[in-house]
Structure formats: structure tokens, C-alpha cells
Amino acid sequence: MDERLIESLSAAVAASPEDLPLRLHLAELLVGAGRGAEAIPHAATVLAREPDNENARDLMARAMTSHAESAPVDGESASIDDDSASTSADSGVFDWGAAESELGGSVPPMFVDGDTDGGGAPPPPAYDAERAGVRLADVGGLKDVKKRLEASFLAPLRNPELRRLYGKSLRGGLLLYGPPGCGKTFLAKAVAGELGASFIHVSLADILDMYIGQSERNVHELFETARSSAPCVLFLDELDAIGQKRSLSRNSGTRTTVNQLLTELDGVGSENEGVYVLAATNHPWDVDPALRRPGRLDRMLLVLPPDTEAREAILRTHLRDRPVERIDTRKLAKATDGFSGADLAHLAESASENALMDSVGTGRARMITMADFDAALAEVRPSIGPWMETARNVALYANASGEYDDLAKWLRKSRR
């Protein structure tokens, strides 16, 4: 009966080699039948995938002991010499030397490096290029921003004949700046969607490394991935952290990272055809000036908090899949002047939370109403206040070159 069961389990393991519990069960039966040598490969396979599996370790020890007791100890065919075999059997101490000899080449190595076979597949890229899946039409409001994006960036790319006629160069990139939470990342993804291009989103954590020279290597690999994925929109998020002013940095690693970034943008040998560089920052005044020279990130676009129309569209988007009743989004849009897109998302989340907690208390689910939003509005405040204070000082006292005229004009118009 045991022999038939062993045969059936052996066939099942051959059909499902990744079923580790099945292997352990088969190994248990083999050890019980005195066939420790046959149990060893199964236990070893499990240990190769689960080194901490106590059951597999116990089975391996029992299988090795069983095999050592039954193995021949005389003549040249013995796997261990007479003295060591008898000593191990008599003392009951597990013989690791015998175990290594018995395993031989039956278990593949747990880990290999990429150079063992010399002709294996190259390692996967460090950065992933994704498809954006959104268009500018999906961005609520921001008509002026879309118009400037179309004129300064998208129109030349869509009309190569006219671009060649007027000698319009594709060199350089676009820097989006403005208060936090206003959709700069979403805009960059929408630009990639308009171009039908791949999209790579990079932040500080993807670049900086504690080891000397690794951050520069990361920057190079990033641009190489973008070039191999062309057409590609490469989006550098929080540029003030990645490309901080070198004059203000005491860290040599940060300075050399900025140098490498400059080299990849327009250095000799940097072929970026089909790579469209976008960047975003809340503090453009902290970005190294060399990054904003012609041929690099030489165009700046102010992304402002959403206007009334955009706020209403954002609120409708966040309430689309929630149970709402008689919500006046127009009234809410007027009551949330100065809110960023992230603030509006937080407002909708807070109103939903009020309704949820009330439903938990009463035991009956109910709809989200204007009363929930009124309660949320009493708690949620615009988050862009600190940024506004800094931006006002920059517009008043650090705008001699006129690069922040758009910001100064908006501050005067909105009386902020």
C-alpha cells in the first residue's frame, strides 16, 4: 500500500514540481520506507526555496541518517570512508561532510550572479516606463496652463513640418512650478498622454544614494532608460531637491549629482531625441540656475490653484463613486477659494468620513449630504498658506530678472 502511495505521490510531484507541501509528504513516506537517498533531493528542493522550513530540515537530517546507515561502507563504492561512517552511526552525530558528499550536484544553487553563463539576458532596467493613460481633457480647469502648454510644447511636437519650416528646436524642457497639491504631476502625465509617449516619474528617492558615485550612475541609467523608451516624457518631481543650488549645498554628492544631470540634459554625447523632459517644483528659486539655462529646463510655467470651474470639476470627480445626495458642487466650489486639488480631495474624504462614522453609530448606512460637507469645511483649511508667504517675498524682492512676473501678476490680481 505504501509503495503504491509513494508511486502516486512521485507522479504528482513530477506533474507539480512547485508544490512544496506535496514534496515534503513524499519525502516523509520515503524516509519511513527506509529510502532516505530518494528523500534527500525532495527535502533539498524545499530547503532551497524555504531555508527556514523546520519540517524540511528535520526530514533532511533523518533522510541523511537513514541513508548513511544503509549505505555501503566497504570498497571504493562507499561515499564516505569506513571510519567516518561507523563513527557517525555510533555517535548519532549528523555528519555534514557526508551530507555534502551525498548532495553533490543534485540541488541547484540558490543564488547566481548575472555573469555565470556569460550570455544570459541583461538585467531589467532600474526604472520603468509606463503608459500615461490620461489626456489634457481629463484635467479640470487650468485653461491658461493648457493654452501655454499647447503653444510652447505640444504644438511644435505635433507639427514637425512647421517646426522645420520655422527652425523650432526641440531642445530644452519645461519646468512646472506653483503651490503644492495643484496637479503638476497630473499635468505632466497628461502631456505624455497627448504625445502618446511613455512616462517615467522620478523623485529624489529614486536618484540619491549613500554610496559615492552611485547617484550619478542612477541619473545616467535614468536617461538611458528614457532614450531606449523614446518617445518618452521624463518627469523630474521635486526638482529643487534633486537639482538644488550647488552654491547652497555642503554635500559634495549633491553637487556632483547636479553636474551629472546637466551633462545628461545637453552634454556632449547626450542624444536625447524623442526624450521630453518635464520637471516640477514648489520652489523654483531653490533650483540651480544652470538647470534653467537655454537648452535645458528653459521654460517655466506657473500652475496655480484651481479656479471655481476647476474646483467644481475636481469635487465631482472625487464624489463620482460615492453615495451622495443633493450635493451643491457649485456652492462648494465658491466656498473653497484658495483650496488646492489635494485640499479638495481631503475635503471630500472628510465629508465621507463624517457620513461613515454616523452610519457606524446608527447601524444604518446613509448618503453623504451637504451637512457632512459643512462639517468638513469647518475643519479643513487651505494648505498653501506657507508657500504663499514665500512666493510673495520672492515676487516682491527677488524678481529683478522678471522671471516671476506671472507669479507677481497673479498675487496682485488675487490680492493675496
Image (tube, helix red, strand yellow):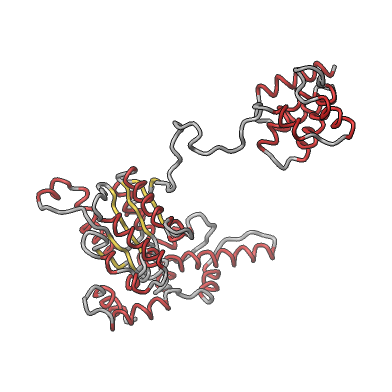
Residue farthest right in this picture: 90
Q: Going by the image, does 116 lie left or right of 333?
A: right
Residue 225 at x, y percent in the picture:
37, 46
Tell me the residue at 59%/67% (across/down).
Answer: 354
Q: Is residue 315 above or below residue 27?
A: below
Q: Give the image quarter of residue 388.
A: bottom left
Q: Is residue 404 above or below residue 243?
A: below
Q: Nearer the viewer, residue 130 or 410?
A: 130
Q: Nearer the viewer, residue 176 or 104?
A: 104
Residue 376 at x, y percent in the picture:
53, 72
Q: Give the image quarter of residue 76.
A: top right
Tell me the residue at 65%/62% (across/down).
Answer: 359
Tell me the residue at 45%/56% (across/down).
Answer: 206
Number of numbered discs = 0
Q: Going by the image, does 11 lie left or right of 373?
A: right
Tell me the residue at 46%/68% (across/down).
Answer: 343
Observer able to see residue 154: yes
Observer able to see residue 31: no
Residue 99 at x, y percent in the picture:
75, 31
Q: Give the image quarter of residue 340.
A: bottom left
Residue farthest left in this picture: 165
Q: Is residue 321 above or below residue 227?
A: below
Q: Quadrant of the N terminus?
A: top right
Q: Quadrant of the C terminus?
A: bottom left
Q: Is residue 361 above or below residue 89?
A: below
Q: Nearer the viewer, residue 212 or 123?
A: 212
Residue 8 at x, y percent in the picture:
75, 18
